[in-house]
Amino acid sequence: MPTTLVMILGFIVAMVAGNGWRWWLTAGGAGLVVLPLGQGAPRVAVVAAIFGLIVVGAWAWGTRSGRAVGVAVGVVVIAVLAAVFAVSQWPRGLVAAPWLDWFAVWLLVGVGCLAALVIDRRVHPFSSPRLAGGNLPAGKVQWVVSMATLATVVLVCGGGLGVVGEDGDGRLRFSARGDEVLPLPTSLRLVSADTCADGGSSGNCTAEFVVMAADEADRTTTVTRLVENLRSRGWPLRLDHGVYRGYRETGGILNWTAHKMWLYANVEPASVLRPAPPPDAVVIYIGNL
């Protein structure tokens, strides 16, 4: 027992001594949490923080290249992860892609980090002090732990994304979000919203947003206000046989299916599949087929 305690203490001392830059890099990876938080997505922010910490931390604690190279590569990895997020989530007027878009590319960065650690191991053989009373170099323990942790996370997450990608007909789809319609002007109010009111196979989904006038205006006025607002938000709606229709391409890095919007200029046609909306209400439909 005393020998084991000495080994553990010796390992901790070896980890902390002169490794301030490794701690800073690891903190920088976890700091990627601020990116999804800026979008108001706390759950996704947890994913970004954990994955960023593991990827950057694996390099920081696994490399034997020294401080200069270690910091340089670590900063580049953090910058690449942040740049991928920015490209994915700020699509310049297009519909923003879901978080799986940037996370899929982050997995590729993780694979690149694994490759970098393997190359680093071949270039820089282990020369760090051995653990007190043990036979394994402290540097080798750090490298093995870094590799094992990063490889496990990449395999698990990659397998999960693989299952998602296979669940369909080969096309990437995501359901419409509220921010594709909202916020509404003060003259309109949202009655109800269902991001997947009607769906089928291969991940296709049709969202429905029921809107009415806030000042008891008639349906024709509501349609006019709504179309003007949606056009200002980037939807190129055109009137075609009593129906306003328009497509918006999706942004992001992966090839996501465009979203289609339509709404009826006149009275909503009757449907046996769903209850009729209020007479003065307008239903906005957004599909991802």
Image (tube, helix red, strand yellow):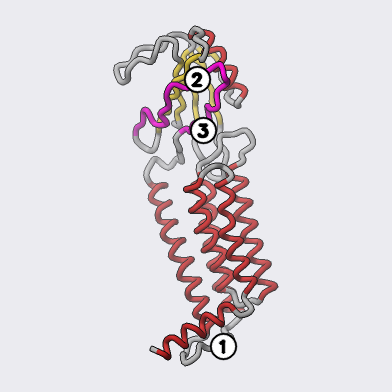
Point out the stretch of residues depicted in magenta.
176-200
Q: Residue 267: image x %, image y %?
A: 43, 9
Disc 3 to disc 2, C-alpha distance: 26 Å
Of label 1 and label 2, which has the lower sequence position?
Answer: 1
CB atoms of marks 1 and 2 within 8 Å: no
Disc 1 to disc 2, C-alpha distance: 68 Å
Q: Residue 75: image x %, image y %?
A: 66, 62
Residue under the image location 46 percent in, 14 percent down:
264
Classed neighbour count for the residue bearing mark 1: other residues with Cα under 10 Å, few (<14), some (14–19), many (≥20): some
Classed neighbour count for the residue bearing mark 2: other residues with Cα under 10 Å, few (<14), some (14–19), many (≥20): some
Q: Nearer the viewer, residue 253 or 75?
A: 75
Residue under the image location 51 percent in, 82 percent down:
11
| Residue type, numbered disc 3 | Ala
Disc 3 to disc 1, C-alpha distance: 57 Å
Q: Which mark is residue 193?
A: none
Q: Which mark is residue 129?
A: 1
- In the rendered image, the quadrant that contains the C terminus is top left
Dot in front, 1 or 2: 2
Q: Which mark is residue 258?
A: 3
